[in-house]
Image (cartoon, coloured by chain):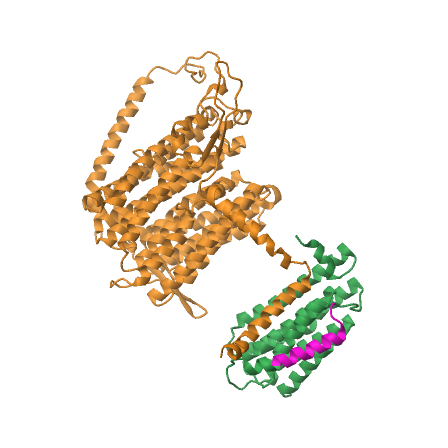
Chain colours: A green, B orange
Amino acid sequence: MSPDLLIALVMLTNFTLVATSRINKAIQVAVAQGVILGLMPLAMGLGRHVHILAMAAAAIAVKGWFIPFLLRRALRHVKIHREVDPFIGYTASLLLCAAGTGLSLVLAHNLPLKPGATPAFLVPAALATLFTGFLLLVSRRKALTQVVGYLVLENGIYLFALLLVEDMPVLVETGILLDLFVGVFVMGIVINHIRTAFDSTDTRHLAELKD
Amino acid sequence: MSTLDVILILAAAGCWVGSALVALGARDDRPGLLLGLAGAILASVGALHALLGGPPSRLDVAFWGVPARLEVDALSAAFLLPLQVVAALGTLYGREYWPLAAAKGSGRALRFFFGTLAAAMTLLFLARQGLLFLVAWEAMAISAFFLVNTEHGKPEVRRAGWVYLVCTHTGTLLLTAMVILLARRLGGLLWVPVPPGPPAALDGWILLLAVAGFGFKAGLFPLHFWLPPAHAAAPSHVSAILSGVMLKTGIYGLLRVSGLLPSVPRGVGGALLALGALTAVYGVGNALAQRDYKRLLAYSSVENLGIVAMGVGLGWTGRATGDPWLAALGFGGAIFHVWNHALFKSLLFLGSGSVLHATGTRDMEQLGGLGRRMPRTALLLAPALLAVAALPPLGAFLSEWFLYRGLFASLHRGYPWSAGLALVALAFTGGLAAVAFARFYGILFLGQPRSPAGAHAHDPGAAMLVPMALLAFLCLAAGLAAPLLPPLLDRAAAPAGLSLPGILATGLARDLRLLLGLELLLLGLGASALAWLRRRPASEQAPPTWDCGYAGGTARMQYTGSSFAEPWAALLPGLRTRMRRLKALFPRPQAFRSEFQDAVGGGLVDPWIGRLAARALRLRRLQPGYLSIYILYVLLTLLAVFLWPLLRERLLG
């Protein structure tokens, strides 16, 4: 597998995520994206480093198995299947996502990066995934979709980190993974509490908690 | 170069961490107490060996490739010893004072953070690398924050905790800047003394930042305002370790950092001397105005830290003028006073804890006559009272005597302004401290109870009395064994810079022996006079307290704390009294009110923070409460960061 193919797949999953309204599908796509990213280090030929392999295996395990497990459980609890009436509609989201991807191409072209043997589209794809995550976080209303947005955001960071993977200490990578895990875990608990408190998982209700 | 001492002390830090962890799960206090005592003994052995002339012992380690060094020399040992004594006795005291099963798990939290505080400070005194020092410093500060917040149900305790946290972090900010500058000066994070050479322009800045950052911790005026509320709010054995040891980490930092530099600019020493003098007078003046006896002790700590800072300032003056005798007297006096203060202030806080435990109030005006009801506590506090008033034969008298010698020598050598000021301030402080503690003891322990709170008080149990008795013994020992101490002080002061080996030991030995002989003679005379006066057998029943001949006196006829302090009211900057003038021959009933407000904390900082907070409220429009909007802010910031370099090229060329 060439890394470019995987990067193209990641870009496609971005657009799918933005355009889908079914929460279950969004989770599936985000998980698929996580697994694709987990395979990236192998495709980039970094398989000779043991600690990178271990990190990739841990990332696939957490993103491909544990987080979907948590999310599906939350989904069963809250019994909602569709994101209706988001802040930004699906067509508009798709256009914004396209604009974000274009912007990331421009940005990546102009960023002062270390010249090296990284795949040409790695940085644009990382930025595009980052923006997609932000878009999901900003535009969606249900807590679960926001968690998916958070997951995608982290995928973008992970992709970007692959640039530095040979120089970055294991501690930092482990930290990012732990951060993600704790984030999703806490959100899972929060979602349950939102539901019991407001009888819905609409995050707009959280505005009532404002000081 | 042996590593044994450093390993012993590291093991002690491990024991303290263990004692902290054990407290989370154990059913009773015994394992935590034993671990703590083991740690204290291990560290004391290591520190004593270093102080009695063992070679400096060091251990080089590396964290992620960054070299770090742990080292025990006599200066570290001089601060480690009081830490271990106070921490071990505090743990023992806490067993009864704050039972493990106290409400809402506060007993466990208290033990946990007490252990981490002791471990962090142990590490702090070992650290010889900037980052390690800062990490230990922060661990200490945060443990202390949670300890102050033990009774976080009370609003005034929470407030004291927050004020402390903000102050300590401001101090850490300054220290971080200092560590960075120091790394630039030393050419690395390792704290290895610069070889003698010309002074660099950075030295002045490093010392200035050190005085500001460490001054926050040591409570130097005007950075002291966090200290009294925090000490009053904390449980008493915690106040003891905070006041007895943690404040001294600021002094340790000053000595350690200045010892790394080849020279000290002359103005800095004089300025610190003057600042210490101001702090001492201000602290003791405010101590005299307090109604809350724990606040009184805290202000007295401000005073004593001022005296210690005067010693450091004197030592720096000695270094700046190349005068080893001044440097030795200044640094030696400062370290000796640190020891004495650690002992007597811990004893005073533990004693006040016993009073609080027995009566439940911190208000002096509610108490009285405790001497009859708590005879053991009253007796054990006596040495501490003599020490805090700097009276012979206690150690504090001698440490202040060191400073007097140094200040007179400084006057004699013709650098008078700061030394003259400090001499007057030191004498004045000693006198006022005697008044303040005559008031403390007289109002609390003599006379009649002023309210039912104190009427049924009784002495605490052995777990609280034994630590107090040990401290009282050590207080007396520090005074009576003083001729043995100058060699130790010589060694402890050496890392602070410019000292000849054995300078204090040879210079002061004769005078110290003479002083001690005189003291013992006077004590013997006093004791035999007392014995002669009391030669008649005591009558069977104890008579009531003498009421000066007024028949049927009541408790309301006694001096109150406020009335006792009234003649000095002009000196008390924070005290406001309000009473309408009495008119006519038969005036109507009148009320008298007095309020205390710290001139810096309550008078300046509070209103300023209030105005700042009112202005900051306008920013609340940015907070709509929607998560999406917040994330949008993050996104916009990120975009701005990315786009800025691109646009800057296009726009500015």
Query: Residue at the spot x=51%, y=24% of the render?
Result: B450
The single residue placed furthest to the bottom in the displayed view is A2
| Closer to the camera in the image, B369 or B645 | B645
Q: Nearer the viewer, residue A169 or B116?
A: A169
Report the quarter where the N terminus of chain B lies.
bottom left
Please tell me whether residue B554 is drawn above or below residue B28 in the rendered image: above
Residue B247 locus on image (x, y percent): 41, 47
Left or right of B342 in this view: B333: left
Q: Is residue B360 magenta?
A: no
Relative placement, left or right, of A24 versus B218 is right
Query: Where's residue B11, x and y in %?
Result: 43, 56
Q: Magenta stretch: residue A97 in it?
A: yes
Q: In the image, B444: left or right of A177?
A: left
Measured as percent of width and height from the top left, residue B648 is found at 52, 76
Percent x, y of residue B410: 22, 45
Is residue A92 in sight in this rendering? yes
Please provide the residue range marked out in magenta: A87-104
Indicate whether B594 appears above or below B282.
above
- Name the dominant secondary structure of the magenta segment: helix
